[in-house]
Amino acid sequence: MEGDAEQLSARPTLETEGLRFLHVTVGSLLATYGWYIVFSCILLYVVFQKLSNRLRALRQRQQDRAAATVEPDLVVKRQEALAAARLKMQEELNAQVEKHKEKRRQLEEEKRRQKIEMWDSMQEGKSYRGHARTPQDEDSPGPSTSSAIPKRKPDKKPLRGGGYNPLSGEGGGACSWRPGRRGPSSGG
């Protein structure tokens, strides 16, 4: 029994010495090269991520190529659908352009007609602005003329007196701005 006790007591001391030796060597290794190990681990992680992304993209491209070579009918259908969509969009654009041209023509015709009316009224000695309003009044008979009388707006008070000028320096109280002296400053 005493031999077994000696073996048991000897064994933990050997294990603890081994752990101490491991602790000392690992501790000194980390103390000496710790930051290098940390930075190299980070660098390896970043490189691994970049390579895995590139490999994933490469595999995806290979699968796309394989799918495209296997089903050329799908590629043709896609191209036809794309061409049809482009044609439809072009037709819509052409329709919008035609509408815009028509509106422009109408506006130019209206401007031309107004200029002609203005010229005619000026030749007759009338005011062209008054002439532009008269056709509306002439078209509507009797009763509507009484409602066509313009209403007077109530007279409003001005916000400031008539003599107020913010640039004059008057009426502003003690706050008046004056420009500085010209020339270089004569500081001490």
Image (cartoon, rainbow, N blue to C red):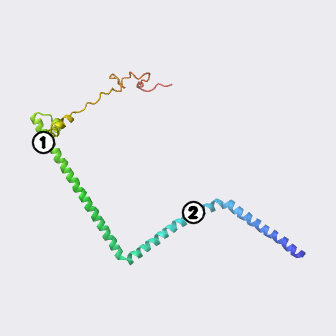
Judging from the image, what secondary structure is the residue with disc 1 in? helix
Disc 2 residue type (three-letter): Leu
Q: Nearer the viewer, residue 69 or 19?
A: 69
The residue depicted at 71 percent of the width and 62 percent of the height is 27
Tag 1 and tag 2, C-beta contact below 8 Å? no
x and y, in percent, of residue 150 in the image:
23, 33
Q: Nearer the viewer, residue 57 or 106?
A: 106
Residue furthest to the right? 2
- Give the class, few, some or many, for how many residues have Cα within 10 Å of label 2's Cα (few <14, many ≥20): few
Up the image or down, 60 lies above or below 159; here it is: below
Could you tell whether 65 is left or right of 29 in the image? left
Towards the viewer: 14 or 167: 167
Q: Is residue 66 above or below residue 99?
A: below
Q: Is residue 65 shown left or right of residue 18? A: left
Q: Residues within 10 Å of mark 1 (few under 14, many from 20)?
A: few
Report x, y in % for residue 16. 79, 67
Determine the CA span between mark 1 and mark 2.
Answer: 82 Å
- Residue designated by label 1: 116
Q: Quadrant of residue 121?
A: top left
Helix, strand or loop under label 2: helix
N-terminal of the pair, mark 1 or mark 2, is 2
Name the quadrant containing residue 112.
Answer: top left
Quarter of the figure with the N terminus = bottom right
Return the residue at label 2: 43
Q: Nearer the viewer, residue 17 or 124?
A: 124
In x, y percent, where is residue 136?
Answer: 17, 40
Q: Position of residue 97 (x, y in %)?
A: 23, 56
Residue at x-position 21% and y-position 51%: 103
Residue with the most extreme front position? 143
